[in-house]
Structures are given as structure tokens and as C-alpha cells.
Image: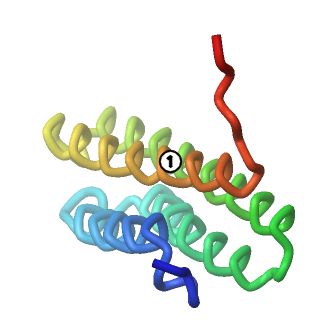
Amino acid sequence: MKIQKFEDIEAWKKARELTQSIYKVSSKDKFMKDWTLRDQIRRASISIMSNIAEGFDSGFTSEFARFLNISRRSASEVQSQLYVALDQLYISTAEFNDLYGETEEVRKMITGFIKYLRGYKPKTR
């Protein structure tokens, strides 16, 4: 399938789902009252989606890859903030594992897309 708009990008779709999950969990009890962490993790998850979309519209493969790198770093930021939420008992271990895994899936998709854009060729033995 040819990608015609950013909404066609699988990594963007998964990032959108992740953002929905982050909003859901950060709307609970104690987590909701920690304005700083709540807003930061939400902004980081939004950044994943936004940078994929913005990079797609850049018009240049190298620029798109640069935005995808920013998106991937935002995913790492979400993962780090999930540890804070876990340590503060805002989320359960099960929620942490689910969200961390969901975020890791997005990171891997973005990494694969970056490699594709850069013409990655695996080493042969």
C-alpha cells in the first residue's frame, strides 16, 4: 500500500493508540493530580504522533528521517516517565508493562521506518 497521507503510516496509527492509552491511565486518581508528570507524559506521547506527521509533510526523505528520530526519542521519554508513574504508585506493574510494551512497539516501528528511508541493507556474512 502506498502511503499518501500521514494517517496511512502504521507507526502513526500505533502512536495514536498509545496516546489514547496514556491519556486514559493519566486521568486516574493520583496520577491526574500530579500535573507536572501528567502533562509531560501526555506531551511526549503527542510528540510521537506529531513528529511523524510533521516529518511526512517535510517533502525530503532526510528531513522525514530526522523527524522520525525525534519521534523515537519522545517514545523513550514516555518509557522513562512510565517508571516515575510506577515508582509513585500511579500505575500498577501490569499497566506499566502494557504501556511500556506498547511504547516499545511504536519505537521499533519508527526505527524500522528510519532504516527503510535510509536504504538500510543488512550485512551479509
Residue 35 in the image: state x and y as whole percent: 45, 65
Q: What residue would you read off at disc 1? A: 107
Q: Is residue 110 left or right of residue 81?
A: right
Residue lying at the far bottom in this picture: please name it: 5
At mark 1, the secondary structure is helix
Out of 34 and 22, give the one closest to the viewer. Answer: 22
- Render colour scheme: rainbow
With 69 as the anchor, is 110 left or right in this view?
left
User: What residue appears at the point 59 percent right and 55 percent down from the top-left corner?
Assistant: 113
Q: In the displayed structure, would residue 87 be above or below residue 3?
A: above
Q: Nearer the viewer, residue 49 or 85?
A: 49
Along the line of sight, which residue is nearer the eye, 114 or 15?
Answer: 114
How many numbered marks are there?
1
Which x, y percent locates residue 6?
56, 83
Q: Is residue 77 above or below residue 14?
A: above
Which percent across, then down, holds residue 107? Answer: 50, 48
Q: Residue furthest front?
A: 125
Residue at x-position 49% and y-position 64%: 45
Using the image, determine if residue 65 lies above or below residue 84. Answer: below
Decide if residue 20 is on the left or right side of residue 53. Answer: left
Badge 1: residue crowd in 10 Å (few <14, some 14–19, many ≥20)? many
**Residue type pointed to by label 1:** Arg
Above or below: residue 73 compared with residue 17: above
For the C terminus, the image quarter is: top right
> Residue 76, image x and y in percent?
55, 43
**Quarter that holds the N terminus:** bottom left
Q: Residue at x 67, y 46 (%)?
A: 115
Question: What residue is shown at x 71% (from left), y 41% (from top)?
Answer: 120
Q: Which residue reaches farthest top? A: 125
Q: Nearer the viewer, residue 102 or 46?
A: 102
- Dividing the picture into quarters, in which one does residue 61 lie? bottom right
